Structures are given as structure tokens and as C-alpha cells.
């Protein structure tokens, strides 16, 4: 099966070669874990290496802020825009959802006329502002994913780890709809903070089950080796496993 590279070799290895086309990918993590950086990789690689123009939808940051953040990593988003490989849009969840439901909306025209094949949405957590009804929120998420698939788009949805009341509203809804789910976490190991990536699910494909280290540096995200001899990683505070201690 053809795969879509994430633009990060180590992550592609965890995904058995990359994402499945026309899927909805949820990337969840706390602020600063690199969700937007992962989206940059996804869009830039698609445009530059796989001839798949991308669309970056932001609900929180103006394009100028994203240009600055990308520049610090060595990514030139402006140059990609000039060649037609990338389109940047700052909008609201309300306007975005309305655009998906209107066949001749500016959003749909942009996707069709520019042959957009990859979309990154930052962040899907903003949809929790639209309703306090869990079923209504799930309906919005389902419509979002279905509409983008209808247009032949592979969508990356960024989700924040937020306060308890927001998690209670969102719990299970976006994760259930997503075809692939990637978690980015901070871990405390030997009194130092490290970053960890895990592929929680991937419909229609096998994937790595281990938890791997990653760094964010000039050039973006670099995924390293799995954590070895540790347990309790997803709790945020790792400890040496009993097997490792006995050995």
C-alpha cells in the first residue's frame, strides 16, 4: 500500500512506512512537545517530495508567528507558499466548519483549485468552545473528518492536553474518529525532562508498540531509540523496570 511520509524517518519507521492516504491523524500532546513542528514536517515533505500541496489551518496563531517558528527550525514556509506547495489560513472553528459544509465555499474552492492533498489543523481542541454537549462535539468531529476525506485529503489534527473539564468533554470523541493517533509526551527520567513519542493506534496497518525518544533541534524532530529498562513511562515519571533491576 502506498504510504505518505511524515517527513520524519524515525516516525515513518514506527508507522510501518508512513501514514495511510486519506486518513485522519490525531497528534496529541502538551504545549511545547512539538505538535506544530510535526505538522510542518508533514506539510513540507508532502509538497517538496511527494507533489502533494498542503494547507495549514490555524485557529490560534497568525501566519507571521508560524513563519517565525518555522524559520527557527530551518523551514522556509514563505518560499513554499510562493511555489504553491503550501497555503496558510488563519480562521475560526465556526468559519472552518461552515466552509466544509458549503460546496462552493472559499475553503472548498481552495482545496479543489490548489489540489490540496494534506491539511494540518491547529488545533482541533478549539472545537470544544463551540458546544458543551459531548454528542454534538462528536458530530462536529465526524463531519470534519468525513468532509476532508471526501475531498481526498489526508488530515493531521493537533490536539492539546488541556484542563480536566475540557478533557471530560472531549474524552474519546476525537480519538475514536481518528484513524491514527500519535502521542507526544514529556517524561521525567533520573530528574531530567525528556520527550517521548508513541503511536497509540493505526487503523488498517501494523505499527510500532514501543515508546521512543525524540529531540527537537535545527532541522526539526529527530526520533531516536526506544526507551529500554523503564516502566511507567506514560505516567510521566519513569522508573527502572524490575527485570532491569534484577539483571
Image (tube, rainbow, N blue to C red):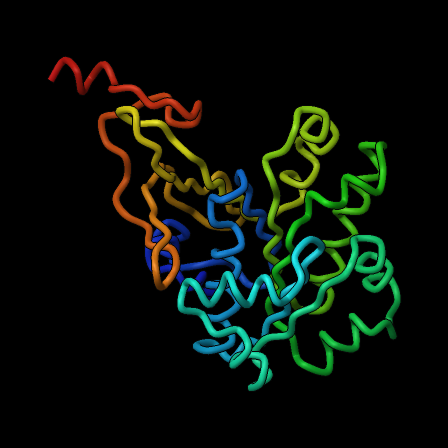
User: What x and y, as percent, mark residue 245?
Assistant: 17, 15
User: Which residue lies at the image location 69% right of the left edge and 62% below the top edge?
Assistant: 149
Q: Residue at x 38, y 38 (%)?
A: 209
70 displayed left or right of 143 = left
Vertical placement of residue 50 versus 83, above or below: above
- Left/right placement of residue 92 relative to residue 200 reads right
Q: Is 245 on the left-hand or right-hand side of 214?
A: left
Residue 194 % position (x, y) = 34, 36
Q: What residue appears at the point 52 percent right and 81 percent down from the top-left corner?
A: 79
Residue reaching furthest to the left: 247
- Of residue 170 and residue 208, the one placed in the foreground of this image is 170
**Can residue 89 be seen?**
yes
Where is residue 100 drawn, in percent x and y? 81, 62
Quarter where residue 164 is shown: top right
Residue at the image position 70 percent from the left and 36 percent from the top: 173
Along the line of sight, which residue is nearer the eye, 224 or 135?
224
Q: Quadrant of the C terminus?
A: top left
Residue 1 seen anywhere in this rendered image of the structure? no
Residue 91 horizontal/vertical position (percent): 77, 61
Asked if residue 201 lies left or right of residue 96, the reply is: left
The answer to whether residue 218 is above or below residue 28 is below
Q: Quadrant of residue 155?
A: bottom right
* In this view, 104 is above or below 56: below
Tally the marks.
Answer: 0
Amino acid at each position: 500500500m502506498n504510504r505518505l511520509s511524515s517527513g520524519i524517518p524515525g516516525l515513518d519507521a514506527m508507522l510501518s512506512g508512513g501514514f495511510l492516504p486519506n486518513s485522519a491523524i490525531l497528534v496529541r500532546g502538551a504545549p511545547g512537545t512539538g505538535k506544530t513542528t510535526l505538522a510542518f514536517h508533514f506539510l513540507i515533505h508532502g509538497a517538496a517530495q511527494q507533489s502533494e500541496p498542503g494547507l495549514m489551518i490555524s485557529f490560534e496563531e497568525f501566519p507571521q508567528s508560524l513563519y517565525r517558528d518555522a524559520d527557527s527550525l530551518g523551514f522556509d514556509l514563505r518560499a513554499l507558499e510562493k511555489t504553491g506547495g503550501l497555503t496558510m489560513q488563519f480562521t475560526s472553528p465556526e468559519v472552518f466548519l461552515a466552509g466544509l459544509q458549503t460546496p462552493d465555499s472559499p475553503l472548498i474552492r481552495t482545496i479543489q483549485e490548489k489540489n490540496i492533498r494534506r491539511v494540518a489543523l491547529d488545533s482541533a481542541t478549539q472545537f470544544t468552545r463551540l458546544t458543551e454537549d459531548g454528542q454534538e462535539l462528536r458530530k462536529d468531529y465526524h463531519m470534519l473528518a468525513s468532509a476532508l476525506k471526501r475531498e481526498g485529503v489526508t488530515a493531521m489534527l493537533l490536539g492539546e492536553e488541556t484542563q480536566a473539564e475540557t478533557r471530560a468533554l472531549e474524552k474519546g470523541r476525537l480519538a475514536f474518529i481518528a484513524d491514527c493517533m500519535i502521542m507526544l509526551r514529556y517524561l521525567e527520567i533520573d530528574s531530567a525532562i525528556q520527550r517521548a513519542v508513541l503511536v497509540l493506534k493505526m487503523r488498517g496497518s501494523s505499527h510500532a508498540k514501543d515508546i521512543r525518544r525524540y529531540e527537537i533541534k535545527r532541522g526539526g524532530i529527530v526520533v531516536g531509540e526506544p526507551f529500554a529498562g523503564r516502566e511507567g513511562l506514560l505516567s510521566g515519571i519513569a522508573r527502572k523496570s524490575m527485570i532491569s533491576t534484577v539483571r
